[in-house]
Image (cartoon, rainbow, N blue to C red):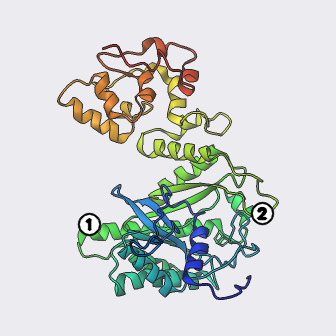
Amino acid sequence: MPAVGRTLNLREKLAILADAAKYDASCASSGTIRRHSGDGRGLGSTEGMGICHAYTPDGRCISLLKILLTNFCILDCAYCINRRSSSVRRARFTVDEVVRLTLGFYRRNYIEGLFLSSGIIRSPDYTMEQLIQVARTLREVHHFRGYIHLKTIPDAAPELVAQAGRWADRLSINVELPTAEGLARLAPEKDGQRIERAMADLDGRIRESREARRRFRNAPTFAPAGQSTQMIVGADAADDRTILARADALYRQHGLRRVYYSAYSPIPDAHPSLPPGAPPLVREHRLYQADWMLRFYGFARSELEAIMPDGLLPLDVDPKTAWAPAHRQLFPVDVNRAPRELLLRVPGIGPKVAGRILAVRRHRTLRWADLARLVASPRAVRPWVATPDWRPTALLDRESLRALVVKPRQGDLFAPPAA
Ligand code: SF4
């Protein structure tokens, strides 16, 4: 383990350990808040270090302090900047420092919670104990009511994982790579089966706790926001078909709330078996879109596989728009009569918009202008829907429909209907 020269102050540790945490994709979107008091007004400064955004189970977007307890690690996963053999600058917070930082940021209204992960120091159990101590101190000593997401060490003792779930809202265990072969090659010290067992154990505890609370209102909670995981995309040769199959299996088998896809980002002194460049960021985005189609739009995995004959999702168009031209017999969808399942098949219509359409049409017939006000992109929806004043039949008959949708031209396709 490389030694730290002089003692780092809290601000320097924060810079290192917030930066080290950015590789964890457990934030649904990662924006950065930049506030400072250099002009003499206000109190304190974050300079954007370590603040990310995540979505709670009830859909609220909240700001989290996202840091590692330490970026020292006894393991040597090839894709990780914090691996044992990396020359990266190291730092380590004490439990008390993380507690103070969290409370300080919380009181200044910078954050609503904490996302805490860590490299492994000494042993999985020791590391897990440190993470738990942070959460327990926040909850028991300071009565912290904010959101806590703890990264769980799969090799830690089950009783420690049980304690973590008592204090944290969400727990996560990273599967890291989509296939067992990839994990064995790039992170041979990790045990894929043990990771799966740890996820299954978490799922069992989460279900038990939910069941207990259904029967007894005061039964203790266990990770009420469930568990999530992360897969690195583009560090090995796994294609999108393989990645989505693994994600689908994880959702089904372990009741995951989220699978996060994290595009591999090249690291200094990278292992020779790693690709020299990052995959296109849009690939990560397409995987999220396909993931949502499986979970919320009623698509079967086989339907997605049909749009990736080479195993990869198209990058030039979102997966639903890629799927639609091959099923033009379903379109145009009459937005005033179609059931919710069919509305969800329309490119540009998601669960929220489908719900709004159903609510509005209980009272009146939707015309094109009504629909255009409900959707984020009228242009995206227009080739696939029918209203009393709009029917794109001629467009649907075009063999070149996909090309038109992918590279829309201004003109007939997207012009508003005549009044
Ligand atoms: S255990 Fe985690 S922090 Fe350590 S090298 Fe592997 S991925 Fe990095």
Q: Amino acid at mark 2?
A: Ala
> For residue 381, which quarter of the picture?
top left
| Distance in Å between CA atoms under marks 2 and 1 | 49 Å
Give whichever of 320, 298 is nearer the camera: 320
Q: Residue furthest left?
A: 363
Please tell me how crowded label 1 is: few (under 14), some (14-19), or many (20+) other residues with Cα within 10 Å: few
Residue 242 position in % (x across, y down) = 63, 47
Residue at 67% in and 70% down:
190
Give the residue pinned by disc 1: 214
Residue at 39% in and 34% down:
349
Please state, as top left, top right, bottom left or bottom right, where the C terminus lies in the image: top left
Q: Residue furthest right?
A: 272
Residue 236 position in % (x across, y down) = 72, 54
Please tell me whether residue 284 is drawn above or below residue 300 in the rendered image. below
Q: Nearer the viewer, mark 2 or mark 1?
A: 2
Please tell me whether residue 376 is drawn above or below residue 295 in the rendered image. above
Q: Amino acid at mark 1?
A: Arg
Residue 228 position in % (x across, y down) = 49, 62
Give the residue pinned by disc 2: 270
**Mark closest to the chain's N terminus, 2 or 1:** 1
Q: Secondary structure at mark 2?
A: loop
Residue 80 position in % (x across, y down) = 69, 66
Q: Total marks drawn?
A: 2
Residue at 58% in and 37% down:
305
Classify residue 175 as left or right of residue 372: right
Q: Is residue 205 visible?
A: no
